[in-house]
Image (cartoon, rainbow, N blue to C red):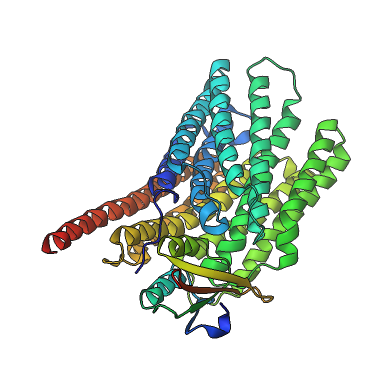
Amino acid sequence: MTGKDATRMIDARGLEPPEPMVRTLDALDHLESGDELLVLLPREPFPLYRALEINGFAWRTTCLPDGTVEVLIRHQTQ
Amino acid sequence: MQALLSFQQAPPLAAPVRFFLTAPLFAIAGGLLLAWSEPAVLLSRWTPTALALTHLLTAGFMLQVMLGALFQILPVVAGAHITRPLLVARLVHAALTAGALLLTAAFLSYEPLAFQLAVSLLGAGVALFVGAAGRALYGLPVSSPTIPGLKLALVGLSVTVCLGVLLAIALAGTSVLPLQQLTAVHLAWGLIGWGINLLAAVGFIVVPMFQMTPSYPEWFTRRFSWSLLVLLTAWGSVELAGGALAAAAFAATLVLVAAAFPVLTLHLQRRSRRARFDASQRYWRVAMLSLLLAGATCLAGNALTEFSEWQAWPWLCGILLLVGGFMSVMNGMLYKIVPFLVWMHLQNLGGGRFIAPSMNKVIATWQIERQMQMHCASLCLLVAATIWPEWVLRPAAMVFLLANAWLLRNLLAATSFFHQHRERIAALTTTATGRA
């Protein structure tokens, strides 16, 4: 599971809450099995983790040196 | 859209909202108390009215908002989940509300039993919250400076309440303690160790998030809270030991270090990517400027002989700090937190089939703007009342009361919005199920 392989990316670093969560969950509604969504955020999205957990998604978080948090998401069944 | 919350773990809307709806009632009571007072009340900070009013705003308004907000902030910004949040919220809220009311009554009556009951309830409520929040935060990886900041703020709250219990015991006449020094230490731990530390820990996240500013520098966020706590401990020890000169030097350093937060926040606000500031952002600006003016007043009151002879200077400092600083920022934060909570819970109730209305519709923008103008007018009038108490004190108290009644009205409008849309979603769900 790497960011380079993601089929879609959302750069939510300049967006005001709750827009990053709204856009991410909207994108997940259309995420096909086998596809991956990469979300770029300015901080760790704890409420998103909870939403991913209860909706059956797996994710991996990477903190980059510039402070950007990368969250790579896919369906848990993969 | 997917579901957002797990109702087994996420705090229900009722957990934080009960604190937010109670807080303005304490400020309204403070306005009434001030309106009933004689102008001479401004001649001393030690009168029963002054002490009762201070605690209506701190143990009443501020503590309710701060703990209510933490029920929401802990899971959202730190990933820290309080176990059984609704039960903890109910118990803490009941203890704090009864405790703050009894404390006000105790200061106005100097009844020993009222002091004992008040500190027992406040102590129990805060101990329960600190225990629950501490357990939620324990062992979490430090993914942002907010997490150690929140822990240190909880230490500040615990020290403040312990010192408050000691003072209440002394006031109830069962102990001989250096009251004046102990009060100064209690005040400093409450306003800086708890208040400024919590404000900074939360600000490190919410200022860049909601105000579209650059982040606070890492060197600052790592050191700020620790510096305040170390200085508070050093100053408090010297103050209680009676070293007047060293205590004055530590106190001045403490005020200057604490002032770094508002200075930096104002600097970051100037670099905001927003074309136009919203009410919350302007509330933050008023708050940061007020905190700086309060710091300057405190330094002048302790260093300049002529200024220190003006009897109302501690009141001016208190008004700038509590009404201008903390209450302004809390008003501004409530206008972000409450609409977000309403939106999030409605979105979740919709279960992906119904889209929740936008956050901006939860409380009408013009109502927020007018309430903010009223709050700022009350701040200006209260400051003016320290100079012309005979003319301005009662109008200032009434405008302060109205500003807080308006805040309550706006928060009630948000809860009413939630209930209306919840019923609508329930009706739509029933219709959709019937069709299926």
Residue B29 drawn above or below residue A56:
above
Q: Position of residue B176 (x, y in %)?
A: 74, 18
Quadrant into which the N terminus of chain B falls:
bottom left
Quadrant into which the C terminus of chain B falls:
bottom left
Q: Going 57% across and 50% down the picture, which residue do you hit?
A: B326
Q: Going 68% across and 42% down the picture, which residue do you hit?
A: B155
Q: Is residue B285 visible?
A: no
Residue B411 drawn above or below residue B33:
below
Residue B82 drawn above or below residue A78:
above
Q: Position of residue B252 (x, y in %)?
A: 79, 49
For residue B212, which quarter of the picture? Answer: bottom right
The furthest residue to the front: A78
Of residues B267 and B402, the one drawn nearer to the viewer in this rendering: B267
Of residues B264 and B320, the one drawn nearer to the viewer in this rendering: B264
Of residues B223 and B404, the one drawn nearer to the viewer in this rendering: B223
Q: Going 52% across and 54% down the picture, which residue do you hit?
A: B75
Q: Position of residue B119 (x, y in %)?
A: 58, 26
Q: Going 76% across and 44% down the picture, which residue do you hit?
A: B232
Instruction: Tell me: B22 left or right of B178.
Output: left
Of residues B20 and B321, the one drawn nearer to the viewer in this rendering: B20
Q: Is residue B299 visible?
A: yes
Q: Position of residue B21 (x, y in %)?
A: 40, 44
The furthest residue to the left: B435
Instruction: Tell me: B166 left or right of B132.
Output: right
